[in-house]
Structures are given as C-alpha cells and as structure tokens.
Amino acid sequence: MHQKLLKSAHYIELGSYQYWPVLVPRGIRLYTYEQIPMSLKDNPYITDGYRAYLPSRLCIKSLFILSNETVNIWSHLLGFFLFFTLGIYDMTSVLPSASASREDFVICSICLFCFQVCMLCSVGYHLFSCHRSEKTCRRWMALDYAGISIGILGCYVSGVFYAFYCNNDFAPRVVVMYVIALLAFLFYISKVPERYFPGQLNYLGSSHQIWHILAVVMLYWWHQSTVYVMQYRHSKPCPDSVSH
C-alpha cells in the first residue's frame, strides 16, 4: 500500500517545504513550465504544478488535487456559491423587508445572475485549461472573457439604475469598487509577487490568485453597495417635484 502511494505522489515545493507530497489520481501528473504546451506558458515565474494533456474526465478529477490552478478554481467556485446564496437571501428576505419594487427585484436578480455566470465561466476555464485539445482550451478561454464581460455588465446595470438617484451617496462606493478593480488589475499585469520569488509561489500566493480573490471582493462590495442604495432609496425617497 505504501509503495502504491509513493508511486502516485508528486513532490512539490510549497514555500520553504521542498518535499511536500501531493497525491494525484491515476492518469494525472503535474508538469514544470518547460514541459507544458505553449498555450499554457503565460507566467514563467510559476515554475511547477501545471496540469496538461488531459481528457475532459481527468480535467474534472483534477478539481480535487493540489495544482497551481487549485486556488484559482476554488476561489471562484466558492464565489459562485456566495452569490447564489446572496441571491436567495436577497429575494426572500432583504428586498421584501425593504418594500422593494418589482424593478428592484429585476435589477438585483440581473446583477447577481451576471456575477454567478462570471464565476462559473472562470471556473470552467481554469478547470479545462489543461485539456489535451488546444482548441477546447481556447474555447474555454473565450468563455472566460465572455464571463468577465457579463460580470461587468451586471455592475453597470445596477449602477445605471441607481446612480441617478437624487442623493449622491452612491459615488464614494463606486470609487471604492474602481480602486479594488485597479488593484486587482495591477497584480494581474505585473505578476507580483511571484516575479520576485520565482518558483516559491507556484501553489499559493501568486498574482493570479490575488486577482481572483480581489475580483470576488469587488463584486461582493458592489452587491452590498447596490443593496445599501436600494434600501436608502425606499427609506428616504426623492421628492416627487421640485418647487420653483
């Protein structure tokens, strides 16, 4: 039994631990940067832990192993469940208690649906980016970009609906969202911190993982801001007319 486990174990460098065993299912192995196809060579500072050349069935199985995509996959999979749960809570408790209108229900539903689609598209790409067919990988990448666009659309639909309310308390919250988005983008394009610690952040702490977590934080902040403005709108309505 011990011999079988050793044969299925892949030893990784995780921080200062250079011999950290990771058990992987039969048919899956982890590759170094030099061994992967060109389509996966996006970040030379991530030197190990790549999944590659897998059929769809093993791509799905790789969800449960530790690779350099594990945090990317699970951060947005948990993000999907977060926004799904918020959707149920909003529809059954938050909006009814605020005496929300039918338009509020529609806007909040669109916003949260877009966020969930964004999360699932990201999960799909990072799960199937190791597919043996480069064409399949590129299709999932296109779907990931589409998901990002849909997530942005969800922000703007709710933003446009509530932004022109008579009270401008929404403006600071918009600024905070853009600051989070800018910070996330800077991590994404700079490849910091792994640029300064090549090979040390292959599995935990890389820029793309930080980008993913900040994306969830940004969308969550926007959801909370939308709910806040909706509640404020119903508790302190604008005057119906302006006296001259």
Image: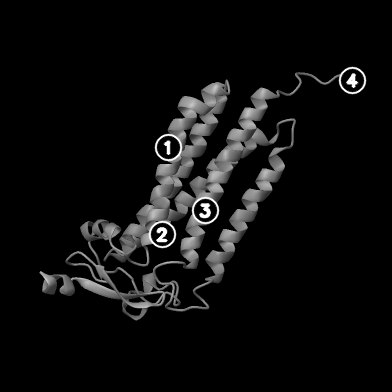
The image quadrant that residue 18 belongs to is bottom left
Cα gap from disc 2 to disc 4, whole angstroms: 57 Å
* Nearer the observer, 147 or 99: 99
Judging depth in this view, the residue of 137 and 230 nearest the camera is: 230
Disc assigned to residue 85: 1
Q: How far apart are marks 3 and 4 (CA)?
A: 46 Å
Q: Which of marks 3 and 4 is nearer the N terminus?
A: 3
Kind of residue indicated by mark 2? Asn
Q: Tell me the SS state at disc 3.
A: helix
**Residue 147 x/y as whole percent:** 45, 49
Tell me which amino acid carries mark 3: Ala
On the image, numbered disc 3 is attached to which residue? Answer: 215
Total marks shown come to 4
Residue under numbered circle 4: 244
Name the amino acid type tagged 1: Thr
* Secondary element at image label 4: loop
Q: Residues within 10 Å of mark 1 (few under 14, many from 20)?
A: few
Name the residue rendered at 49%, 78% in the picture.
197
Using the numbered discs, state the Cα–Cα distance from disc 4 to disc 1 in whole angstroms: 47 Å
Q: Which residue is drawn at 29% across and 57% down?
A: 63
Left or right placement of residue 32 versus residue 54 in this view: right
The residue singled out by tag 2 in the image is 72
Q: How crowded is mark 3: few (under 14 residues within 10 Å), some or many (20 or more)?
A: many
What residue is rendered at 10% in x and 69% in y?
1
- Asked if disc 4 and disc 1 are in contact, CB closer than 8 Å, the reply is no
Label 1 sits on a secondary structure element that is helix
Quarter the C terminus occupies: top right
Task: Locate residue 46, reporting x and y percent.
Answer: 42, 74
